[in-house]
Structure formats: C-alpha cells, structure tokens
Amino acid sequence: MLNQTRICLLVLALVLSAPLSARHKVVPKHPTFDLKRPEIAAFVKDVVARDQLSKKQVVALLRKGEPQPKIIEAMTRPAEKVTPWWEYHDRFLTEERIADGAQFYNDHRASLERIAGARGIPPEYLIAIMGVETKYGRFVGKYRVLDALMTLAFDYPPRSDYFRGELEQFLLLYSEEHLDPLKVTGSYAGAMGVPQFMPSSYRMFAVDGNGDNKRDLWNDWDDILASIANYFIEHGWESGGPVLAETRLDPEPKFQIDTRNLELNETVDSLNAQGVAVLGGPTGTTPAVLISAEQQDGPAYRVGFKNFYVITRYNRSARYAMAVHDLAAAILERANPQRAVAAAARP
C-alpha cells in the first residue's frame, strides 16, 4: 500500500510540474471577419433591407465565417487559364475518368435517357460535366462555402462585387432550402454539390428531377442530372446541334486569334476565307468561334459552335469546354458505341 501511495504521489508531482499548456491544451481560436468593417456592415444593411432577411440571423452567421488566404492564391492561378491545352486534356481524359463515366452511364441509363429525351441534352454531356467538376461526385470541395464566399467578397477586390452577390444568394438559399450553412462545403470559389453550382445558379437553375419537392444537388442523381440539363437549356442548347469540329489550315492562313474570345464572332464561311477549313462540321453561315488547342509539338486549332458556347457558360474557358466535349465523346464511345458511330457521322 505504501508503494502504491508513493507511485500516486510521484505521478501527481510530474503532472503538476508539467507546463500549463501541456495540462490544459489551448486550442487556438480561428480568425474571423470583423463585421464592423465598413464594406461588411454595408453588405449586411443592404441584404437585410433588400431581401427581408433577419439582421440577427445574418450577423450571427457571418460572425462564424473564417478568412481563407489559400483561396486568394488559388484564384490567381486557375488551371484552365494557365495550363496549356495538351496538358489540360491529359489531366481530364484519363482512363480512370473515362471508365468511371462509362460505368455511371450504364448504372444510371434509365434516368439519363429519360432526362435526355425530355430535355434534348445527350446523356454523355451531363456525365462529362460531373466528371470534370467532381469526378462524378467524389470530390465536391473541401472549403466551407460560407468561408469561401466571405473571403472572396471582402478580401478579393478584383471580383468583390460578384462574390458579394453570390454571398447574398447563399444567404437566400440557406433560408429557402434549409441547408446547414456551417457544414456546406464546396470549391475555393464557393461552387456546391456534384455539378458545382454557384449559389445563384443553384437558386435559378436547380430543379426537382423526381417529384419529391426537393432540390438536392449532393445526393439525388435525378435532381443533379436534370439540373445540369436545365442549365444547358436555359443557356440556349440546341438539341441535335454540333459542338466542336477539327480544322485543317491552308499553307498560309490569314487569321488572327484572340485566345480569350468565346463569342461566336465568325462563320464557317468566314473562317474558310481566312484559310481555316472546318472538318466534318456544318457549313455556310453557321456561327462559329476559332479556338486555340495547342499541342506539345506546336499550334493547333478547333472550331466551336453554339453548343460549345453554351458549355462555356458553365465555366468561361475554352479549355474547359473542350475537355467536357472530349470526355463526353470518350464516355459515349465506351458506353454506347453504336450511338457514338451515329453521332460521329452527323455533320
């Protein structure tokens, strides 16, 4: 008994002699936004007045937002703007992503064909959007949407107006859809769910795909697929229309290209007149845009049409839209080779 008492006293002495921080570990407090900053106070005042939201609830939520400096770093170097096309292509056109997309096609064929038939969007494009955005729902983003939107709204001056608008839309979405605003995660830009809709797109384009009176872009595949299709339709998708065509250049072409341009500011005829032959696509006065598709061994070009432009409304990048198109074609060839042959034969 005496030995046990000595041991207990020894242990107690060691504990008491340890530094206070070791006995009572202090968890550092995460930084938060100062809601007294003029621009934040003005934002609160405006959205409360404009949207009839409770000031108490808005302030209580924004008080829990945490700045994320890494988001600012990511915004300055988005991959679709700094990565050459041939590298960007190889990043998304992997065997794994193609195989997983084909498997998704087979697993959800009934829903895909029902939604595609009703809305006129080929199933492979709905799948490819998810494949490029989130690997078919496996990676929907690690940042809290609240933190991302507040960081960009108040600490990223180049696009602060846009992200303040999206933060306002997130507050409305939280009110309407009963989402948990402290648990919803997404991309560094605040995009959410399997299709990575920004809050404004969620409110405007998400639809109930199966009649259960909910719009769930995380777990309900009918809602997810129907919402992507609706996004395309609302931005002008032409059922059965072409997306992209390859080119052949004359020995001395006369064109100049603005790699930032996504507008359909040419026609097939006008490109032909500049030494750009459009291969296997429509002819004549069909609106078109010439796209740089640089390869490792030198320049290359493709031509996009109205449906290509629609894909760029999802992400304002020609590289992004080309990746979606090429992944869609690869998925279709793997999952439905007969339809792939028929699609390739159409002008």
Image (tube, rainbow, N blue to C red):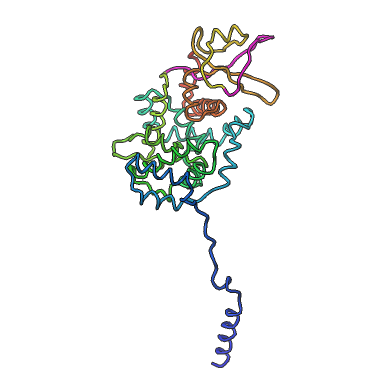
Is-magenta flag for residue 257? yes
Q: Residue at x 52, y 60 (%)?
A: 29
User: Measured along the vertical axis of the image, is residue 163 above or below residue 89?
Assistant: below
User: Measured along the vertical axis of the image, is residue 136 above or below residue 17?
Assistant: above
User: Measured along the vertical axis of the image, is residue 222 above or below residue 284?
Assistant: below
- In the image, 112 versus 238, the foreground residue is 238
**Where the N terminus falls, by quadrant?**
bottom right
Is-magenta flag for residue 89? no
Rendering quarter of residue 249: top right
Query: The magenta stretch spans which residues?
Result: 240-260
State left or right for residue 288 relative to residue 168. Answer: right
Seen as rendered, the residue at the extreme right is: 297
Residue 104 percent across, percent down from the top left: 45, 35
Seen as rendered, the residue at the extreme front is: 38
- In the image, 83 versus 158, the foreground residue is 158
Residue 62 percent across, percent down from the top left: 43, 49
Residue 53 percent across, percent down from the top left: 33, 45
Magenta region, mostly helix, strand or loop? Answer: loop
Q: Residue at x 52, y 11 (%)?
A: 267
State left or right for residue 53 relative to residue 28. Answer: left
User: Measured along the vertical axis of the image, is residue 250 above or below residue 223?
Assistant: above
Residue 236 percent across, percent down from the top left: 41, 21
